[in-house]
Image (cartoon, rainbow, N blue to C red):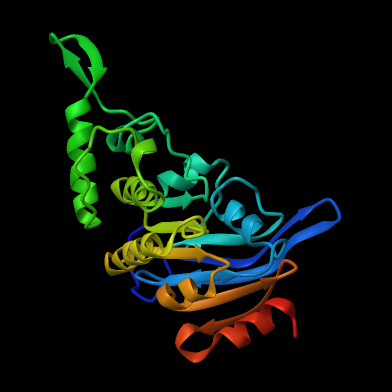
Amino acid sequence: MNNTNPNTPLLEVRNLSKHFGAVRALNDFSMAVRAGEVVALAGDNGAGKTTLIKAISGVFQPTGGEILLGGQPVAFATPQEAREKGIETIYQDLALADNLSIGANIFLGREPMRKAFGFLPVLDRKAMADAARETMKRLDFHVSRMNAPVSNFSGGQRQAVAIGRAVYWDAQILIMDEPTAALGVPEQRKVISLIHQLKAQGRGVIFISHNLQDIFAVSDRIVVLRRGVQAGERKISETNHDEVVRLMVGG
């Protein structure tokens, strides 16, 4: 996803629509995400946020409109195809395997193998542990028990593992669905600082949250959805909580 033109967005959605029968879950929606930018998506339940991220990440096929990566039109038949093109979605439930280590979670479904005795394929646990340690170091995240199952970790640490997996596979666009929802305040701060690091690395982040405080702490722009259409877009530096709430409720 190397952009020839630095002004070309990493990701652009143009006039995207998704209809389920007569229900227009998303209608003629457009937005862009640039390198090193966090774009917040806000809107009440049923506003179309989930439909949008599922259309971008290959879960749903759009009814109309187009998705561009680095200025090139793309179409994903599956989430795996989107991942291979550098789009990772981190859902609220994180989709981590609780009984496995950080390394095993980073490589889930893509495990590295080595040959034992020169011929027997076995899991390369050392490669997995090394990659986990290196990735977590890049996120300035220090955990001593690399082999512990992730079920032992706190909510913020588990978020870091999910983000680490995306970073390891070199995701350029991270879609984060309510990443701070179930966390206490110190943990929320940790996740916000992780997002700032992703930004500094030149990745693009789509940040979905009901928490306006978090949105204002981490985002560059906010796009508000209401009943499947774009109700407004603002630079964070040029708006406030009241205006965002008015856009969300249509007041």
Determine whether 114 is above or below 106 in the image.
Answer: above
Q: Is residue 184 visible?
A: yes
Question: Residue extending furthest left?
Answer: 117
**Position of residue 59 in the picture relative to residue 144 (left or right):** right
Closer-to-camera residue (1/249): 249
Quarter that holds the N terminus? bottom left
Could you say where residue 181 lies in the image, as x and y percent from the top left?
A: 52, 59
**Position of residue 63 in the picture relative to residue 140 (left or right):** right
The residue drawn where x is 68% and y is 77% is 248
Q: How many marks?
A: 0
Question: Residue extending furthest right?
Answer: 22
Could you say where residue 125 lies in the image, as x and y percent from the top left?
A: 22, 26
The residue drawn where x is 66% and y is 71% is 225
Determine whether 57 is above or below 205 in the image.
Answer: above
Could you say where residue 12 lies in the image, as x and y percent from the top left?
A: 51, 66
Q: Is residue 71 visible?
A: no
Could you say where residue 58 lies in the image, as x and y percent from the top left?
A: 56, 47
**Position of residue 149 in the picture relative to residue 142 (left or right):** right
Determine whether 226 is above or below 171 in the image.
Answer: below
The residue drawn where x is 18% and y is 46% is 134
Question: Residue extending furthest bottom?
Answer: 238
Quarter that holds the C terminus? bottom right
